[in-house]
Image (spheres, helix red, strand yellow):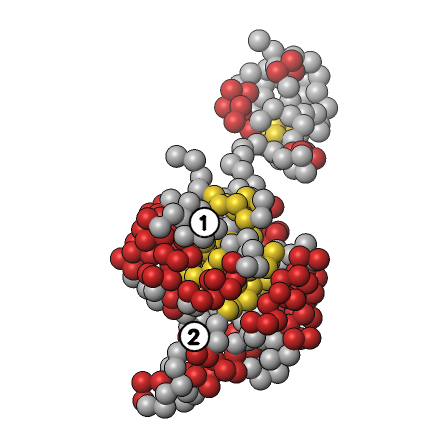
């Protein structure tokens, strides 16, 4: 079976190809379009391949209701907030989208978004996104997944909180609705997520189970987590990007600052180079180090016809003589000529 892949804006995404790195803007624009535009430039500068938005309004994602069901409970950084108020603070105004998409295109940076209802899909279609993202919380919204799949564009679906059966439902529904290119993201929907709950070994299993490329949507603040994910086969990495965590905002606590994001990108690229391909034998850089291997040397002056013994032949560095595995064959045989101490042994110096 060939390795699964998808193509985003002409770029192949899958095992064996460079990791597709997404900078998630989310609410880190702090309701300032100039900050949103600046973050797009920062994403390009720190090495991201794409900038991602979120497309909703408070009224498309929830309703303005004040009963207990709409109050965020304990266990998240948004504890005590009303849902409508939270999304009013966090959403990206739709009238910004054309300008943000155009800014990214000028920088040769992919720009796409996460839609949260059919109206946002209809709106985004007018902007021609190269791919759609389904958020972890929306993975169980099968009607939304079907609507996105019907666009025919590639889909990246995040799997935070999802059971295996829920992922099956989402992937199956997308495929039944016409999606030909699907990728999944391993995700822990804790904000921030603890590394010990990431279970990154799920990444190769997800790829095997669903025959799709798999990446990581990472809400940890640890560089080791995306590096380990790439080593396990992740071919997409999504991280939140902020100008500064010191600026209060709904998502700032689990977002990377520019220098951290850049360091993560560099670590991922180093990991990709280090993974390489299965290989045995010395590399080009190792060739000179072969001299430091051990080999068989004459360590005492010897006369022609004298027997080789454990006292006059030793396995020592450097590696100019016969390999040490021939020691037992050499012992007891005789020198073919006079030999000086420090002579590397070769078969022509051993009498028949």
Q: 256 or 104: nearer the eye?
A: 104
At 48% across and 57% down in the image, what residue appears? 132
Q: In the structure shown, which secondary structural element does the residue marked by tag 2 occupy?
A: helix
Q: Position of residue 12 (x, y in %)?
A: 54, 44
Q: Position of residue 260 (x, y in %)?
A: 63, 67
Q: Position of residue 199 (x, y in %)?
A: 39, 61
At 42% across and 65% down in the image, what residue appears? 118
Which mark is drawn over residue 60?
A: 2
User: On the image, which quarter does residue 102 sit in?
Assistant: bottom right
- Relative to 68, say whether 96 is above or below: above
- Relative to 152, say whether 141 is above or below: below
Q: In the structure shown, which secondary structural element does the residue marked by tag 1 occupy?
A: loop
User: On the image, which quarter does residue 319 sit in?
Assistant: top right
Quarter placement of the C terminus: top right
Q: Position of residue 67 (x, y in %)?
A: 32, 90
144 on left or right of 298: left
Dots 1, 2 in contact, CB < 8 A: no
At 58% across and 21% down in the image, what residue appears? 308
Q: 254 or 10: nearer the eye?
A: 10
Residue at label 1? 152
- Relative to 257, say whether 3 is above or below: above
Which mark is drawn over residue 25?
A: none
Q: Residue furthest top?
A: 352
At 58% across and 44% down in the image, what residue appears? 10
How packed is label 1: few (under 14 Cα within 10 Å), some, or many (20 or more)? some
User: On the image, which quarter does residue 111 sit in?
Assistant: bottom right
Q: Is residue 218 visible?
A: no
Q: Residue furthest left?
A: 165
| Nearest to N terminus: mark 1 or mark 2 | 2
Gap in Å between the C-alphas at discs 1 and 2?
23 Å
């Amino acid at each position: 079976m060939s390795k699964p892949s998808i193509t985003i804006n002409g770029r192949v995404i899958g095992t064996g190809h460079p990791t597709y790195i997404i900078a998630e803007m989310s609410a880190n624009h702090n309701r300032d379009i100039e900050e949103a535009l600046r973050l797009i430039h920062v994403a390009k500068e720190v090495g991201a391949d794409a900038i991602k938005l979120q497309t909703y309004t408070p009224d498309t994602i929830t309703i303005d209701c004040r009963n207990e069901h709409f109050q965020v409970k304990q266990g998240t950084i948004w504890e005590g907030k009303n849902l409508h108020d939270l999304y009013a603070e966090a959403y990206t105004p739709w009238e910004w989208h054309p300008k943000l998409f155009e800014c990214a295109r000028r920088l040769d940076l992919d720009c796409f978004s996460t839609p949260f209802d059919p109206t946002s899909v209809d709106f985004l279609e007018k902007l021609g996104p190269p791919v759609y993202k389904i958020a972890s919380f929306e993975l169980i919204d099968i009607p939304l997944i079907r609507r996105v799949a019907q666009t025919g564009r590639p889909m990246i679906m995040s799997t935070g909180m999802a059971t295996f059966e829920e992922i099956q439902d989402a992937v199956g529904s997308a495929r039944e609705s016409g999606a030909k290119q699907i990728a999944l993201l391993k995700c822990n929907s804790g904000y921030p997520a603890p590394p010990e709950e990431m279970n990154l070994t799920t990444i190769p299993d997800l790829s095997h189970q669903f025959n799709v490329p798999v990446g990581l949507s990472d809400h940890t603040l640890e560089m080791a987590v995306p590096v380990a994910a790439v080593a396990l086969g992740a071919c997409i990495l999504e991280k939140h990007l902020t100008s500064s965590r010191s600026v209060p905002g709904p998502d700032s606590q689990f977002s990377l600052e520019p220098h951290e994001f850049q360091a993560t990108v560099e670590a991922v690229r180093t990991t990709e180079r280090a993974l390489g391909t299965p290989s045995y034998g010395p590399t080009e850089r190792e060739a000179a180090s072969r001299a430091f291997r051990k080999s068989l040397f004459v360590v005492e002056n010897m006369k022609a016809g004298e027997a080789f013994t454990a006292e006059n032949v030793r396995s020592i560095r450097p590696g100019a003589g016969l390999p040490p595995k021939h020691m037992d064959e050499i012992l007891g045989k005789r020198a073919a000529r006079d030999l000086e101490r420090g002579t590397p042994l070769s078969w022509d110096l051993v009498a028949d």
